[in-house]
Image: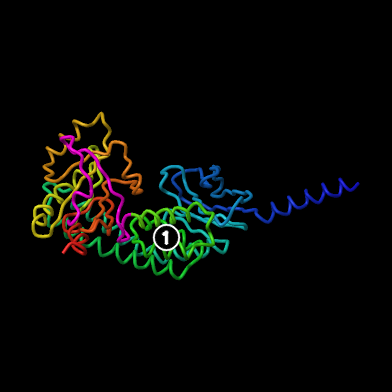
Amino acid sequence: MKKLILGSLILLMAISCGKKNQYTITVKAEGGPDSLMVHNNWYTSSDTLVIRDGKCTFTGVIDTFPKLVSIGFPMPSQLNTRMILEPGNIKVSYTKEGGFKIGGTKDNIILQKLFDELKPFQSEVMLAWKAWGKAYAKEPRSKEECESAWLFQEGVKKKNLDKTRELIKANPNYAGLVIALPIIRNEPVEYLKAYVDAFKAFTNDERYKSIVKEYEIAEKTISGKPVPGFTFPDTTGKMVSLSDFKGKWVLLDFWYVDCPWCRKLTPHMIDIYKDWKQTKNFEIVSISVDKPKDYQRWKEAIRHDGALWTQVLDSTKTYPDEYGITGYPTLILVDPNGNGVRKVIGYQEEGGLRRILGEFVK
């Protein structure tokens, strides 16, 4: 009898816990590009439902929450929205004109409010990028037009960044963590530290861990502390170390032969290098991550592109991995004392790169 009562209590507790952690996502979709809706519960599972009469409903029990997930159409895959999985009745709507809207539960209501506040700034950024892309694609390409478009997009990106930081500071909640994620790769140490502290309530969350990781990488590379040294072979087989350049400003350039934007950045670095080599005690060291089989192609690319500075090969990718570099090109500026002070990710027009580096190299 006692065993029966105990078993019943355990069953009731399990049912009660299940209800407590239960969620329902009610979707209303009009004019979508697909008849399917995908709920991607990152790190665990992905569910797909057919949209019938413009509706579908996902239900389940949450293992941990809140948790960042996504919901959207399978084709095109980029047509989706971020959403916070938490207990309760989550509401998602989609229209062709207005896109996705989320709500229904506390965190999703806050997140949608933040999305709405950021939308005009992000729309400006998108338009600015398109304008620059149009200028860049012109034949013949006008350097002046590209530089002007690049300078404009720098301005609107800064406005978007400032607004995002303002909203993060005002929202030390999970919705604030969500809007922090797109900017963390480029943030300086002090902001990353602030995010790590602000969102400590979500220590076990995978997305929080990604912020902590970015902070730890920044501490090693751009915090004004000595960066890890290296010794790699140059194009002649001579071993070259970072310490060989102590007393100079050194721009570390991570690249590989088949990276198109790495190669497009090279002419801008050539112009800057010619100007600054003597006048500003400035050097560039390019670190290729090409594999041994591409050794000759690496040397030919250097010759073809006319890069005038030290080139070394890290075919095992030990240095980029230590620096947490996940995209190319990536540049890291090291001061004359061997301290990392700035990271630059991705292609830059020459004027933009000069402005960034010129904040440090005088």
Q: Is residue 64 left or right of residue 113?
A: right
Residue 288 point in image, percent of width and height: 24, 40
Residue placed under numbered mark 1 in the picture: 180
Residue drawn at the location 19% of the way across and 47% of the way down: 285
Determine the image quadrant of residue 302.
top left
- 228 falls in the magenta region: yes
Residue 16 point in image, percent of width and height: 73, 54
Residue 61 point in image, percent of width and height: 64, 50
Q: Secondary structure at mark 1?
A: helix
Q: Is 24 or 36 nearer to us in this picture?
A: 24
Q: Is residue 167 above or below residue 102?
A: below
- 266 falls in the magenta region: no
Determine the image quadrant of residue 311.
top left
Q: Is 137 or 346 nearer to us in this picture?
A: 346
Q: Is residue 189 left or right of residue 114?
A: left
Q: Quadrant of the C terminus?
A: bottom left
Q: Is residue 206 above or below residue 312?
A: below
Q: Which residues are magenta?
A: 221-248
Please, what is the three-letter code of the amino acid marked with disc 1?
Ala
